[in-house]
Image (cartoon, grey):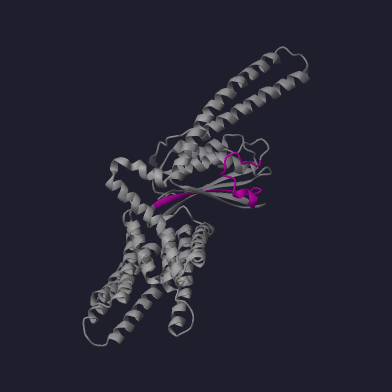
């Protein structure tokens, strides 16, 4: 069962990558690696059912295709610094030589050992190249992803040691196939979810999957225990079946979506109605919020205008200073409430981005000039470090200026006694393409840990007169640009907002 599950999972992952709209060399190389593993495990599984020569050939072809495809994938994933292109060619030649040796009818045991040693050497070499790349010149986010994969490889190798004990007669279940299946899925998440840069986000996803697998396994044994009358299957068999179902769910859904759209192009919404409840609900919530915001703004602004007009009229009639001060408060608060309504409308209403390929540095400089023109304290120092070699990215300049200004003013408010505001741009080169990074760092009082998880939520604020829509609007704008925004903070030392836009 473990072998069959690994074959099915690797095949499903490969197909889900190959049918994606946005394919790149990294996706294709990983899909090829998964197909090679599928051939190897499918040949092994079929040989166990019926020992035929054809199944043995399939197993051998798959096993010897793994080394060159693994080198090609590692080279693309790690940035090509430590694995030149000729390494793929040499590995392919080595596999071909060993495959040719299988055509001769002598030394079968020797050929099997040679293949095993060859694959182990290639695995070790790719792992070493990955470790060297972690200390290389890649972007910090890419180095972090490589470190995650390296750690996952170590965990997979540790679990695979159980096969050795099992072959020696110890009562230990072989876990290598399970480890490889989990590793393949983990790598799939790493390369396809660039919006998850932190380890805890990957671990949260892995935790959810683990809970689903354990729940499915427990429910199966519970049902078998209550109603089953036959023999109970082994735990590893049931666990691998649950792993296959849970891991294959997302790729299988993508495959079904593609197949359904191809077969029934005129009924695209039907599939969405079956499997897109979350997206549909989110869209309905946005439409409801837009409709509610428009009506609410109308109902609030009309009375506000009357209140403000009446207060301004009375200002010219009253004679006492105390009454005039009270009327000033009414006018001031009416203006503030009108500003709150305007911010709410800006957040709720849909906005079509006017995207244009451009250098982000002039956008940052324009935002900085606006910030400096707003009567800042002399104790606030604004510094910029703009990379002159940035690629052009598709951005809406006006919206990006709004994002920079909102974050910068929040940072300035966090430095009431003065400090430094640093805006920096950086170039991000990865296998997916070129992107840009924008960091905004302050030396203010920082943000407490319990507040960090909520700062991008609408109406969350720590200020007495704030409404909590500024950062929520920033998050929405960056998300519409196809990027992401993150924040890190140390109380008492300052905060840094990091924005990534591009591939």
Spot occupied by residue 144 in the image (x, y as percentages of width and height): 49, 61
Residue 331 position, x and y percent, is: 66, 22
Q: Is residue 434 left or right of residue 335?
A: left
Q: Based on the displayed image, in which of its 4 quarters is residue 429 positioned?
A: bottom left
Q: Which residues are magenta?
A: 434-462
How many numbered marks have been drawn onto this rendered protein structure? 0
Task: Give the camera-side residue of 307 and 367.
Answer: 307
Query: Residue at image x 46%, y 69%?
Result: 229
* Residue 253 makes an appearance in the image: yes
- The structure residue drawn at horizontal position 33% and vertical position 42%, both measured from the top left corner, is 268
Q: Position of residue 131 (x, y in %)?
A: 45, 69
- x, y percentage for residue 108? 28, 85
Residue at position x 36%, y 69% in the image: 4
Q: Quadrant of residue 192?
A: bottom left
**Residue 111 drawn above or below residue 2:** below
Residue 361 appears anywhere in the view: no
The one nearer the camera, 33 or 248, is 248
User: Farthest residue in the top direction?
Assistant: 317
Tell me: 135 left or right of 103: right
452 inside magenta stretch: yes
Residue depicted at 29% across the width and 40% down the height: 266
Residue 366, compared with residue 451, is above or below; it is above
- Confirm whether the magenta stretch covers residue 191: no
Q: Which one is in front, 104 or 462?
A: 104
């Amino acid at each position: 069962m473990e072998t069959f599950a690994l074959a099915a999972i690797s095949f499903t992952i490969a197909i889900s990558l190959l049918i994606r709209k946005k394919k790149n060399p990294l996706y294709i190389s990983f899909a090829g690696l998964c197909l090679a593993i599928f051939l190897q495990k499918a040949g092994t599984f079929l040989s166990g059912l019926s020992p035929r020569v054809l199944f043995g050939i399939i197993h051998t072809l798959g096993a010897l295709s793994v080394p060159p495809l693994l080198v090609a994938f590692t080279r693309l994933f790690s940035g090509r610094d430590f694995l030149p292109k000729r390494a793929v060619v040499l590995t392919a030649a080595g596999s071909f030589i060993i495959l040719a040796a299988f055509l001769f009818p002598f030394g079968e045991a020797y050929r099997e050992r040679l293949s095993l040693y060859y694959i182990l050497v290639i695995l070790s070499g790719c792992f070493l190249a990955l470790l060297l790349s972690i200390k290389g010149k890649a972007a910090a986010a890419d180095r972090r992803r490589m470190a995650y994969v390296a750690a996952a490889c170590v965990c997979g190798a540790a679990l695979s040691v159980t096969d050795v004990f099992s072959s020696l007669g110890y009562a230990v279940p072989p876990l290598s196939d399970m480890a490889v299946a989990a590793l393949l899925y983990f790598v799939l998440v790493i390369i396809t979810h660039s919006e998850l840069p932190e380890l805890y986000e990957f671990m949260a996803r892995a935790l959810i999957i683990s809970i689903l697998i354990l729940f499915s396994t427990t429910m199966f044994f519970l049902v078998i225990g209550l109603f089953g009358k036959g023999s109970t299957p082994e735990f590893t068999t049931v666990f691998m079946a649950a792993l296959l179902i849970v891991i294959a769910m997302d790729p299988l859904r993508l495959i079904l979506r593609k197949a359904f759209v191809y077969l029934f192009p005129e009924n695209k919404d039907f599939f969405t109605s079956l499997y897109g409840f979350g997206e549909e609900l989110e869209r309905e919530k946005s439409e409801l919020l837009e409709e509610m915001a428009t009506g609410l703004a109308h109902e609030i602004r009309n009375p506000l205008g009357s209140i403000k007009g009446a207060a301004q009229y009375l200002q010219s009639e009253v004679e006492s200073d105390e009454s005039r001060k009270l009327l000033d408060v009414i006018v001031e608060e009416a203006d503030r409430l009108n500003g709150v309504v305007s911010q709410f409308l800006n957040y709720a209403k849909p906005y079509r981005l006017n995207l244009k390929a451009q250098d982000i540095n002039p956008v940052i400089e324009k935002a900085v000039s606006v910030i400096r023109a707003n009567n800042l304290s002399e104790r606030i120092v604004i510094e910029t470090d703009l990379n002159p070699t940035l690629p052009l990215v598709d951005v809406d300049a006006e919206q990006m200026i709004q994002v920079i200004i909102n974050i910068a003013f929040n940072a300035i408010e966090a430095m009431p006694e003065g400090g430094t505001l640093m805006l920096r741009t950086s170039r991000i080169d990865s296998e997916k393409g070129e992107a840009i990074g924008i960091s905004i760092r302050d030396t203010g009082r920082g943000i407490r840990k319990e507040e960090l998880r909520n700062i991008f939520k609408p109406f969350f604020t720590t200020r007495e007169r704030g409404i909590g829509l500024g950062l929520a609007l920033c998050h929405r704008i960056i998300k519409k640009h196809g990027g992401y925004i993150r924040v890190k903070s140390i109380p008492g030392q300052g905060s840094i907002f990091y924005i990534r836009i591009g591939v």
